[in-house]
Amino acid sequence: MEAFNTKEAPQAIGPYSQAMRHGNTLYISGQIGLDPLTGKFVSESLDAQTEQVMKNLGAVLRAAGADYGNVVKCSVFLLDMKRFPEVNAVYGKYFEASFPARETVQVSALPAGALVEVSAVAAL
């Protein structure tokens, strides 16, 4: 196994790695809309947080020598499922057909007060 951590994505806020590779599979920890330079949310806007989540996910993918095309599955966590279309519009810009498998769930809270979180699994 190999851990991946990059300064291009927010540092872990707990005892975990940004990603772990096991064999040809990369498991990426949930990313939230924190700016990697400031450690603060880029905005209180769901669109802006989602955009930053996807950029953070991309930074971790790059650190492991991968990109969005390697992603086979994502998990999306939202505070309000009614706002899913907003997240979907941003998320969809980062993937081309064939899209990764995905589930989206509404949760009661996310780390640091985030509005959205996305984790991923990628094939290397």
Image (cartoon, rainbow, N blue to C red):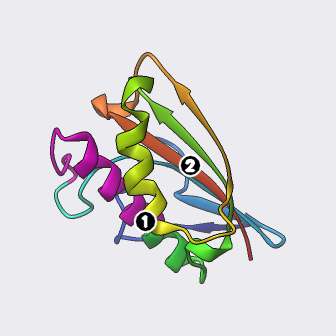
Q: CA distance from mark 1 to mark 2?
A: 17 Å
Question: Is residue 40 within the magenta segment?
Answer: yes
Residue 82 position by quadrant: top left
Category of crowding for the residue at label 2, using alpha-carbon neighbours closer than 10 angstroms: few (below 14), some (14–19), many (at least 20): many
Residue located 34% across and 71% down the image: 8
Where is mark 2, residue-wise?
Answer: 119
State the image coordinates of residue 1 (x, y, percent, origin top left).
77, 66
State the image coordinates of residue 38 (x, y, percent, origin top left).
16, 57
Mark drawn on residue 124: none
Where is mark 1, residue-wise?
Answer: 93
Quarter of the image where the C terminus is located: bottom right
- Helix, strand or loop under label 1: helix
Residue located 26% across and 47% down the image: 47
Residue located 40% across and 28% down the image: 110
Residue type at tag 2:
Ser
Please, what is the dominant secondary structure of the magenta stretch? helix
